[in-house]
Amino acid sequence: MTINKAMVVGATGGTGAAITEELVKRGIPTIAFGRSRQKLEQLAGRLGNPVHLKLAMGDAMRPAEIIAQAGNADVMFHCANVPYHEMASKLIPLGESVMEAAEQLAIKVVAIDGIYPYGRRQSNPVTEGHPKQPHTKKGKVRLDFERMLLGKRWKKARVMIVRLPDYYGPTANEASYLGSTLEAIAAGKMAFFIGNMTVPREYVYLPDAAAMIAEVAGHDEAYGQNWNIPGGGLISGREIVRIARGACGSSKPVIPLKKIGLSLLGLGVPVMKEVVEMLYLTEEPLTLSGAKYEKWIGPIIATPFEEGITATVKALQQANTAASVQASQTADSRIV
């Protein structure tokens, strides 16, 4: 099977933007679906406004709005997400909306998810068959999300779940642990690092993840299953910061945030308070096995951290410069 036409729901988010870019690069006609016209246009502009990319505005919580924009797409990538503090109330309704649209359209769905349902590691590396025994609220919600996606209520839509570890890359934003850290370093500002900075953990470079996701999405027999998308190895926070600082010449401090710091920040920023229960992953990290992917799909794509982090910081600096120029031009036009 090949992907004839794709729809990316949540196209302006971290994973959505990376997957949209990968699909466009492969020449696949793609519909980028999101709530913000401005963000969609910025995405298209960054990709060179390709003719085979269509922008579609809508609310992913409304199946009818997805259906109205889907055209004749045969694969839908579900990249839309919800903030941590809204996960319990909104994650499954969002997924149900996407699946109801897919059911009416009778198309395939590739749902992007993370490692929370696995709970504490019982083996390492973690295969797709690892017991799912989450002990956190968010892990339990994510497991219910998986059960909903793979449930028997969907007769016409076929779905697969692809699982990523923590990720980084030019499109990563505050929804990822590392996104805001690298953004601050690239901007020459003081930064925060969530969790332990000395324990090596797994991270995946988003362009690598997007390429592997696009690859598995093109295999008809891969649907109805979970697929791990592993990262490029293990790296500590200290090493990430060293590479990022070296890429931009920054010497501003990077402060680790643990339970007390996150709890204090959570008084004003609800999302930070919700991170506390997931800190176990920074102390007892798990690593995803890529054995199933390698056996059935192909080789793991793994950009070296030195290269990936450097490219991310450079891209973020370019984006900051472009934003500053645009803001200056806007201010000048108002004066005139």
Image: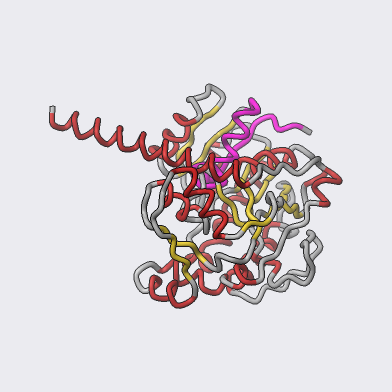
Task: Tell me: 131 left or right of 307.
Answer: right
Give the vertical position of 257 relative to 152 (above or below): below
Corner quadrant of residue 76: top right
Taking the spot 50% from the left edge, 48% from the top edge, the residue there is 244
The outermost residue toward the left is 336
Q: Which residues are magenta?
A: 2-28
Q: Position of residue 281 (x, y in %)?
A: 62, 68
The outermost residue toward the right is 295
The outermost residue toward the top is 51
Determine if residue 59 is in view: yes
Taking the spot 62% from the left edge, 47% from the top edge, the residue there is 305
Q: Position of residue 189 (x, y in %)?
A: 36, 53
Q: Position of residue 291 (x, y in %)?
A: 83, 52
The C terminus is located in which quarter?
top left
Task: Tell me: 153 left or right of 273.
Answer: right
Q: Position of residue 110 (x, y in %)?
A: 67, 47
How many marks do you count on the picture?
0
The N terminus is located in which quarter?
top right
Give the vertical position of 249 relative to 51 (above or below): below
Corner quadrant of residue 319: top left
Determine if residue 141 is in view: no
Q: Is residue 27 magenta?
A: yes
Taking the spot 55% from the left edge, 74% from the top edge, the residue there is 277
Q: How is the image coloured?
A: secondary structure
Residue 333 vs residue 182, the one in the foreground: 182
Residue 262 vs residue 307, the one in the foreground: 307
